[in-house]
Image (cartoon, rainbow, N blue to C red):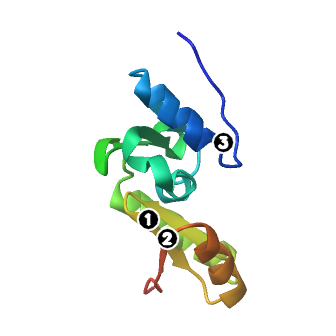
């Protein structure tokens, strides 16, 4: 197995196109959310596999190949614990289609929206 590590800066798009010409499928692997990675690889996103969320979300050509999701009751428990312990905290919940932020902090919202596609909603208690 050969592994190639590619950094940011735009050169990776040229490298990915050359790999495709040779019949090699490139996989962008990261612990980040899918949408965050997809934004970085927009020009070649249909030509590569995305392994996101530390392997919990694998996507190719806008189709989910594998998706490991938490049980709703676990998510609700975590959200309630965060709200109880950190009343002024900001947090993001990842979904397979983007992210949900629970915050009233406009600076935090602006920062996150620069780098990802997030839906801002308030989850009722």
Which percent across, then down, holds residue 40? 57, 54
Which percent across, then down, holds residue 122? 47, 86
| Labels 1, 2: front one | 2
Instruction: Give the position of the C terminus as an image quadrant.
Output: bottom left
Which percent across, then down, holds residue 68? 37, 44
> Residue drawn 49% across and 44% down?
52
Residue 11 tag number: 3
Give the CA distance from mark 1 to mark 2.
Answer: 6 Å
Q: Relative to 12, is 32 above or below?
A: below
With 115 as the anchor, is 79 left or right in this view?
A: left
Q: Which residue is mark 2?
A: 117
Q: Are marks 1 and 2 in contact (CB under 8 Å)?
A: yes
Secondary structure of residue under mark 1: strand
Pick the front one: 85 or 34: 34
> Residue drawn 37% across and 46% down?
46
Residue 30 appears in the picture as rendered: no
Q: Relative to 71, is 115 above or below?
A: below
Secondary structure of residue under mark 3: helix
């Amino acid at each position: 197995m050969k592994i190639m590590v590619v950094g940011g800066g735009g050169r990776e798009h040229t490298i990915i196109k050359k790999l495709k010409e040779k019949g090699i499928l490139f996989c962008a692997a990261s612990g980040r959310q899918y949408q965050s990675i997809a934004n970085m690889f927009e020009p070649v996103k249909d030509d590569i596999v995305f392994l996101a969320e530390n392997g919990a979300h694998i996507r190719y050509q806008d189709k989910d190949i594998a998706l490991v999701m938490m049980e709703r009751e676990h998510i609700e428990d975590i959200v309630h614990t965060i709200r109880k312990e950190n009343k002024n905290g900001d947090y993001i919940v990842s979904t397979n289609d983007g992210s949900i932020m629970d915050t009233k902090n406009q600076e935090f919202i602006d920062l996150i929206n620069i780098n990802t596609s997030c839906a801002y909603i308030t989850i009722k208690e």
